[in-house]
Image: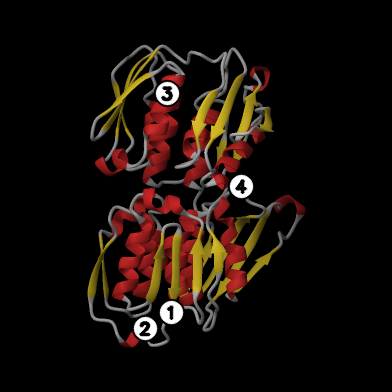
Amino acid sequence: MSFFYKGIIPASKSLMNRALICKSYDGKLKLLGDSQCDDVLMMKKAIEEFDPSKTNIIYNCGAAGTTLRFLALRLSRIPGRHVLKGTKRLMQRPQQDLLDVLKRLGVQSSTTDDSLILESKGWQNLNQPVQVQRSVSSQFASSLILNAWDLETDLTLETLGHPISEGYLEMTLKVVKNLGMQIEERQTNQGTSYRILKQSSVITETPYHVESDLSSAFAIAAYAALNGEALFERFPHPSLQPDAEFVSILQKMGVNIELLPPHSQSESPFYQLKIKKSSHFQGIEYPLQSCPDLFPVLAVLCAFAQTPSRLYDAPQLIHKESNRIAKISELLNQLNVSHEVKPDGMIIKPSPMIHQKINPFAYDTDHDHRLAFAAALVQSQAIPIEILHPDVVTKSFPEFWDLLK
C-alpha cells in the first residue's frame, strides 16, 4: 500500500520556544498554532512555574538545547537562585559560550553533569557591549535577543567568530521584529553588532501565528518522495524557518514537488505543498550551513538517488543531539552505500543494487529524533532494519509514526 498524507504539520518547535519566551514578558500575547512535542511542553511548564518570590526552583529541560539556553537567559533576568536540569547528553553539548554570556551579564553560573545553576541579581553591566560567540551555535545570541524585552537601557550585542546556523539567528531577529522590537545592525571587524533600543523593547504585535514545523514537514516529504504522496496544507511561504530550503533542494533533485498558491488573499502567506513518489531523482551538491537539521534525512534520501551527492558546510553537526555525521555514516555502512565522511558533511555515492545486499541489522537512534526520521526512510524500502528507541521522535514530532501509518 502506498503512503498518503494530507494535513497541517504542527507548529515549529523552534518558533514556538522563541515565541513562548517572548510571551513570558507579556501574557497578553496570543499565539496561534501549537505543538505537543517534548521541547515545547518543557518550555511551557517551565514558564508556568516562574515565581519571583521563590528561589531554588528546579526547571526540567530534558534533552532540549533551546529550552536550556533560552530559559537560562530568561531566568537570569529574575534575581535569585535557579536550577535547570537536563540530560547528561544535553549538558555534554557545548555550553561554555552560554556561561560566558551569563558572566558578562554579571550572573554567576556553574554546571554539574545534569544541571546548570544560576545565581543572579538581574542583568548587570549593560553599559558595555555583550560579546557572544557564534562559532559553535547561534542559540546563545538568539537567547540574549529573545530576552531583551522591558530593559531600562539599550542593549548592544556583538557577535564573534565564524557564524554557524546563521538562518536560526535570522529567524530569531524576524520573530522579535515582528513583535515590535527595534534593532539597529552594523558590521564590525569581528562580526555583527546589534543594538536593541529600550523604547521599542515592548511587545506590540498580537496575535502571532506560529508556522508549521518545516523540519518535521521535510521528514514526511522525503518519505512521500520514496513511497507515495503528501499534501501539506497551510504551508508557510515565504517562511521564517531555515529548513524551508528543503523545497528548493527537492526541486533541484528532480523530486515531484509542487508549491500551490493560496486560494484567496485571506490565506496568504499559506500555500499547499504537493509531493509525489519519484522513481528517479538525482543527487545534489548543497551547503547546509543555515539548515543543518536537514542533514540526516537528506543524506539517506541521497542514498536512494541516481547520482552522487555532496552535503557540506555544516561542521556543527557533530554538536547536535548526536554526532550526526558519524551516526549517518554508521547507517550508510549498514546499507553498503559508499560514502566519504567530511568534517563538515559527507559525500554519498549510491548503489543501484542497495536492496539486494543488506543483512538484518539494528540501528540505535542514540537519543536523536532526526536519526529516527532518517531510519524510517530506510525501513520504508523493505530493508531489514530494526529501529531502536523509535519513541525519541517525541522530542520534536510525536505524531510522526502515526502519520506514517
Amino acid type assigned to the residue bearing label 4 in the image:
Leu
Residue labelled with disc 2: 354
In the picture, measured across the screen, residue 190 lies left or right of residue 116, that is right
For the point 55% across and 68% down, the residue is 285
Observer-nearest residue: 266 or 112?
Answer: 112
Report which residue position mark 3 lands on.
102
Query: Are dots 1 and 2 in contact, CB under 8 Å?
Result: yes
Residue drawn where x is 62% and y is 30% of the image: 193
Q: CA distance from mark 1 to mark 2?
A: 8 Å
The amino acid sitting under disc 1 is Pro
Residue visible at 50% across and 61% down in the picture: 312
**Which of pointers 3 and 1 lies earlier in the amino acid sequence?**
3
Residue 170 is left or right of residue 44, and the answer is: right
Between marks 4 and 1 in the image, the one whose residue lies nearer the viewer: 1
Give the distance between the C-alpha atoms of the residues marked 4 and 1, in whole angstroms.
33 Å
Structural crowding at the residue carrying mark 2, measured as other residues with C-alpha within 10 Å and reported as few (<14), some (14–19) or many (≥20)? some
Amino acid type indicated by mark 2: Ile
Which residue corresponds to mark 1?
A: 350
Q: What is the x, y in percent for residue 7?
A: 53, 61
> Going from the N terminus, do you reach mark 2 or mark 4 first?
4
Q: In what element is the residue under mark 1? A: loop
CA distance for labels 2 and 4: 37 Å
Q: Is residue 253 above or below residue 121?
A: below
